[in-house]
Amino acid sequence: MVSMLARVPRTPLSLDPLIAEAKRRARRRRWLILALLVIGAGATVATIELRSTPRQGSAAVSAASTPSRWGVDWRVRLGVLPVVAYGASSVWAASMAPPQDFHGQLVRLDPRTGKRLATFPVGWWPSQIAVGAGGAWVADTWGDGSRVKDGIPGFANAVTRIDPAVNRVVATIRIPGVQAVTVGGGSAWATAIGLRDSRETIIRIDPATNRATTLRAIPGVNGPVVWGGSRLWALTWFADPTLHARVWEIDPQSGRVIASLVVPGIGPNAALAYRSGVLWVGDTGLLTWIRTRPRLSIGRRERVGNANDLVTTQRGIWASGDRTLFFLGLHGGAMNGELALHGWVSPAGNALAASGAHAWIVTQTATPTNVVSHLVAVHEQGAKTAR
């Protein structure tokens, strides 16, 4: 019998130039984002307001399920290109290093007040934070700033681990090419770009030893990874000649690919989230709902503004993009409300975190000389304060 693993599609040789070009474009896009942030010209500032009814053309919802108002709890200034996450009863935000420094910075904030509880050195360009499995884990896309090697930053990609119980950096795990990090099943998981081939490597980090071991490699260009339903779910691009994104279901124990599914119309800025047996894929406003049982299948697709950042909670789905924060129902994705933001959502990705009826979103505004980032805490009116 041919195993499922044997049927995993392999990247055709003819796709290698396309994949190499996609990687080059991703690198150029990062530098372009940085240049735009430094220039910071021509930003139009909007006023924070609530649209208490769904957008025109969105799915209808009952009045009882539509939030009547949103509240803004606090707003704090952050550094350059911040990423954010929630966990261990705290909000965590990491920013890239300013030009004169050798490391980026992670701050731990009180979700109720925005007060800084602790500050940590992390990699020069943090790309994602995950909290759980005994740590706050920061993927340092451009280097290990918390442990500068020979005084030269940017050449030792790593995941930095902070222990929330003692508020200090306890480990720096070298993972060349690291891009994303998530937690689940008692472990931390990272993805890395294949430095010698066009594949994504999925890596397990053992919290007991802080050792990183390769679980498996899958075809395609590196994308997001999440944990859900005792499985790892990864998304890659250009895994086969369709040139679409592909979602992979992976057994975290054996590394076996259980199933995969092509998701048409999804590009390299996609976000991936899981909740209650459903995967959500968002990219430039196209929200795709994917059933995971009894098999992987696309359930529905709809347009949600320009949203491409996603977080799921027990209450619903938070999405953000452009100048808007959206809240959708967990089952079926019906629009429950949206909030126009003061400024625009950070283009760096991973700029949204949520817990229940509370969300934390990175917004940016421009001055004549630079771009300013803020973390804004919002909640559905009537909900209890986040703790």
Image: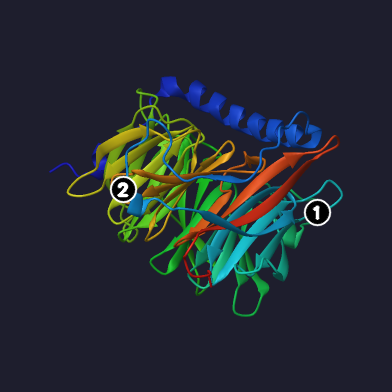
**Residue 131 in view in this figure:** yes
Helix, strand or loop at mark 1 = loop
Q: Earlier in the sequence, mark 1 or mark 2?
A: 2
Foreground tag (1 vs 2): 2
264 up-or-down from 130: above or below: above
Quarter of the image that includes the N terminus: top left
From the top left corner, tell me how far across and down residue 313 is, in percent: 41, 58
The disc placed on residue 62 is 2
Identity of the residue drawn at 48% across and 35% down:
221
Q: Is residue 202 left or right of residue 92?
A: left
Residue at x 73% of width, y 41% of height: 365
Answer few, some or many: residues within 10 Å of disc 1's Cα (few below 14, many 20 plus, some between 14 and 19). Answer: many
* Amino acid at the residue labelled 1: Phe
Q: Is residue 160 above or below residue 199?
A: below
Return the x and y of residue 135 as percentages of the image width and height: 55, 70
Q: Quadrant of residue 366?
A: top right
In the visual, does 161 lie left or right of 246?
A: right
In the rendered structure, the answer to whether residue 345 lies left or right of residue 38 reads: left
Checking the image for residue 198, the label placed there is none
Tell me which amino acid carries mark 2: Ser
Q: Tell me the CA gap for discs 1 and 2.
A: 52 Å
Pick the front one: 56 or 309: 56
Question: Crowdedness of circle 2 by 10 Å Cα count: few (<14), some, many (20+)?
Answer: few
Out of 324 and 278, give the one closest to the viewer. 324
User: Where does label 1 land, which residue?
Assistant: 102
Q: Secondary structure at mark 2?
A: loop
- Answer above or below: position of 57 versus 331: above
Nearer to us in this view, 23 or 60? 60
The location of residue 267, given as percent across then percent down, is 46, 30
Given residues 151 and 180, the one toward you in this image is: 180
Image-quadrant location for residue 264: top left
